[in-house]
Image (cartoon, rainbow, N blue to C red):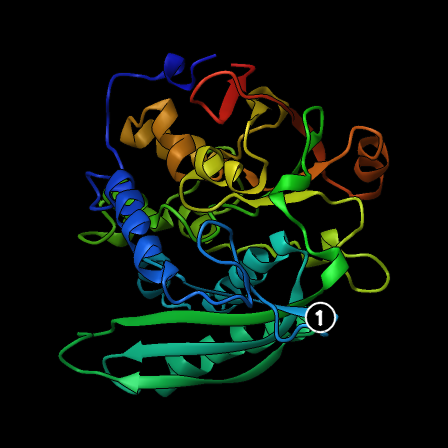
């Protein structure tokens, strides 16, 4: 089924909110071309995956995996509500979820905070979230940088960026080429929007001009809109590791559903020549996404390009391991399967 079949008349888009996903994708292609010349023989995986994989030496049993990201404009929601203790959780967990697809678990984390003025209360709340998430994941908060930059940031502005390094045993490195036709896709639920799509959300509800919408009750939910939007990014580390602390041996691929949704992120973890057949009716979309779509008149396809829609991580396992994995991970469900690619599309949607 073509994913655009269910599109409503065009409403707000991510581009209207200042984020052009197509232009970003084109820019990333150019970045990859420029960066390619810097990659030596020790780089096992660079751009294209979720984390970069480095071989520290020919005789090393342990590989290093790194990633970096920012919280994005979710910070604007924290500023409007006046609560900053969850933002640190967001960036740590996002970075953890970006090294998991290589089979890596976190070793240490670094942060960068750029801020307009040295606000001790705000900084203390940010660090509270960072330390909480690092403690929960067994990850050292090794250090960071706080830069006070008036003229770059204004008023209450600040930015929060995270850098993570993890490790994976060489023989446990997860590679897209190990996936095959017939493998099963298992879904793990998101805790909300995580850290993507907030520029569009701010546009839909006019939050930058009037943040009162954040106080409104959320239809179908006991929380306010603001509480739902500020819900921290979920870490899938405890969902996917075994008793030894390593990513489960049954896992053949992991797609962290971030910016670009299922259409961008599942193809990153499956072999060339394969497509993911995803049953969109296999899970119930959380109320916050439905409220955003109705309020903004956003097209069906655009929602699935921008947001995770309640699907935070896709796990690829063999058909023979699927039932055991489903039984052992609470809250998981079968999302679909891998099929032979017959056209240009890498993700085929069913069920709606």
Residue 301 in percent (x, y) is at 37, 25
> In the drawing, does residue 106 fall left or right of residue 69?
right
**Residue at 77% from the left image edge and 42% from the top image edge:** 330
* Nearer to me, 181 or 244: 181
Residue 54 versus residue 36 in the image, above or below? below
> Outermost residue toward the left?
151
> In the drawing, does residue 148 fall left or right of residue 6?
left
**Residue at 32% from the left image edge and 24% from the top image edge:** 299
- The reply to whether residue 291 is in sight is no
**Residue at 71% from the left image edge and 43% from the top image edge:** 252
> In the drawing, does residue 149 fall left or right of residue 331?
left
Q: Secondary structure at mark 1?
A: strand
* Nearer to me, 21 or 82: 21
Residue 148 in percent (x, y) is at 26, 86
Mark 1, residues whose alpha carbon is within 10 Å: few (<14), some, or many (≥20)? some
Q: Which residue is mark 1?
A: 62
* Quarter assignment of residue 37: bottom left
């Amino acid at each position: 089924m073509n994913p655009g079949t269910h599109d409503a008349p065009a409403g707000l888009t991510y581009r209207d909110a200042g984020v052009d996903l197509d232009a970003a994708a084109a820019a990333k292609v150019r970045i990859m071309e420029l960066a390619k010349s810097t990659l030596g023989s020790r780089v096992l995986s660079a751009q294209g995956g979720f984390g970069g994989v480095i071989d520290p030496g020919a005789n090393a049993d342990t590989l290093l995996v790194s990633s970096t990201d920012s919280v994005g404009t979710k910070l604007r929601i924290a500023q409007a509500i006046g609560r900053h203790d969850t933002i640190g959780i967001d960036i740590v967990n996002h970075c953890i979820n970006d090294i998991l697809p290589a089979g890596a678990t976190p070793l240490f984390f670094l942060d960068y905070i750029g801020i307009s003025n040295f606000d001790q209360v705000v900084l203390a709340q940010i660090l509270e979230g960072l330390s909480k998430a690092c403690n929960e994941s067994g990850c050292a908060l090794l250090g960071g940088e706080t830069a006070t930059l008036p003229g770059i940031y204004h008023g209450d502005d600040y930015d929060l960026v995270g850098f993570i390094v993890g490790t994976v045993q060489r023989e446990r490195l997860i590679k897209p080429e190990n996936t095959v036709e017939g493998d099963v896709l298992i879904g793990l639920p998101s805790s909300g929007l995580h850290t993507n799509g907030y520029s569009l959300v701010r546009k839909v509800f006019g939050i930058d001009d009037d943040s009162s919408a954040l106080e409104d009750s959320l239809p179908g939910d006991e929380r306010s809109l603001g509480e739902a939007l500020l819900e921290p990014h979920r870490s899938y580390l405890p969902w996917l590791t075994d008793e030894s602390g390593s990513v489960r041996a049954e896992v053949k691929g992991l797609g962290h559903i971030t910016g670009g949704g299922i259409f961008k992120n599942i193809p990153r973890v499956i072999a060339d020549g394969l497509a993911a057949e995803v049953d969109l009716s296999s899970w119930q979309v959380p109320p916050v996404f439905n409220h955003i779509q109705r309020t903004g008149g956003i097209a069906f396809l655009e929602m699935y390009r921008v947001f995770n829609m309640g699907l935070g991580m896709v796990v690829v396992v063999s058909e023979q391991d699927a039932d055991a994995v489903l039984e052992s991970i609470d809250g998981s469900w079968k999302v679909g399967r891998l099929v032979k690619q017959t056209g240009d599309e890498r993700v085929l949607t069913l069920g709606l």
